[in-house]
Image: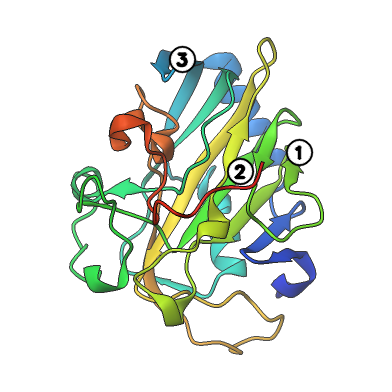
Amino acid sequence: MKMIIDASTHKICSDPQIWVFDDLLSESFLCHVDYLFDSRELHHSASCTDGQVRKASSVALDVDHNSRELLDAIKDVCQLCEVEPCRKILISDVIGDTQSPHLDHVSMDDLSRNYENLNFLDLSKQSLSANDARKIVPTYSIVVYFNAVGGIRFPASKMRSDTISGKRGRIIMFENYVDELRPASRLTSVHYGYYLDKVPKRVLTMGILANRTPPMSGGKAGCCERVPGLIYCPGVLDEPLRHDNPSYWPGGVHYDGPASQSLPE
């Protein structure tokens, strides 16, 4: 019988709500990803924006019996009713400069190329980019690490330490909304990933779209209603870190919010 996970034991921050899971992915799945990087021809790309340079080598894969475990793990901890399955994911080895602080956004136009059923989304419940109303903040952001390189920092969070290090098999999930305040997104979810110059960080970024925040598992079967939504991977071969796609941020603005708000040093 499958064990029901109590996500509350994995929560490390309440503002924003952040969970860290280190035991959801099997070693066989992690080794399968390693095998893909060793055996497949990788797609190489580079980005240079605002003086930041990052290079990536990526593997795109269809969600099949070998990779379904990852999606199932996310649904084990998040009470989501998928309106349409995620069919493709992109995993990348990334080296280079640290990201600028940002809120994740995804393009509805990008999503429409891979998903047929986006009509369930109520855009009045989504935070729209001030630069492009077709780009929205996801309900959850997800970062999956495949090695112990780099990490992610939340400079405006209420954590005792604002940095979470990468670890093989680690899944980091965090909320981008307080439902009562939608469509506004929460400034404390501003974050950025950091990398090394020589050793690549093997990472996957994903998100969940929904009109209200699906509750996390409480450790009991049927304890929470599942909320309609979809899991997506924003990356494409030429821009594997598309949540922080430079084309989303003209003028160097990396998050939306009142001009009077600033991030702590």
Of the residues under marks 3 and 2, which one precedes in the sequence? 3
Q: Relative to 134, does residue 201 appear above or below in the rendering?
A: above
As shown in the figure, which amino acid type bears the numbered disc 3? Gly
As shown in the figure, which amino acid type bears the numbered disc 2? Val
Q: Which residue is mark 3?
A: 51
Q: Residue at x 70, y 71 (%)?
A: 7
Instruction: Check disc 2: other Cα within 10 Å, few if <14, some if 14-19, many if 20+.
Output: many
Mark 2 and 1 residues: CB-CB less than 8 Å, in contact? Answer: no
Instruction: Check disc 3: other Cα within 10 Å, few if <14, some if 14-19, many if 20+.
Output: few
Q: Relative to 217, does residue 105 appear above or below in the rendering?
A: above
Relative image position of residue 62 (x, y in whole percent): 40, 39
Mark 1 and 3 residues: CB-CB less than 8 Å, in contact? Answer: no
Query: For numbered disc 1, what is the local secondary structure?
Result: loop
As shown in the figure, which amino acid type bears the numbered disc 1? Lys
State the colouring used for the structure image: rainbow
Q: Relative to 67, does residue 24 appear above or below in the rendering?
A: below
Relative image position of residue 158 (x, y in whole percent): 71, 61
Is residue 63 or residue 150 the one in the foreground? 150
Of the residues under marks 2 and 1, which one precedes in the sequence? 2
Relative image position of residue 122 (x, y in whole percent): 24, 72
Is residue 129 or residue 122 the one in the foreground? 129
Is residue 215 or residue 13 the one in the foreground? 13
Q: Tell me if residue 122 can be seen.
A: no
**In front of the other: label 3 or label 2?**
3
- Judge left or right: residue 49 versus residue 91: left
Of the residues under marks 1 and 3, which one precedes in the sequence? 3
As drawn, the label of residue 261 is none
As drawn, the label of residue 144 is 2
Cα distance, mark 3 to mark 2? 26 Å
Mark 3 and 2 residues: CB-CB less than 8 Å, in contact? Answer: no
Quadrant (top left/top right/bottom left/bottom right) for the C terminus: top right
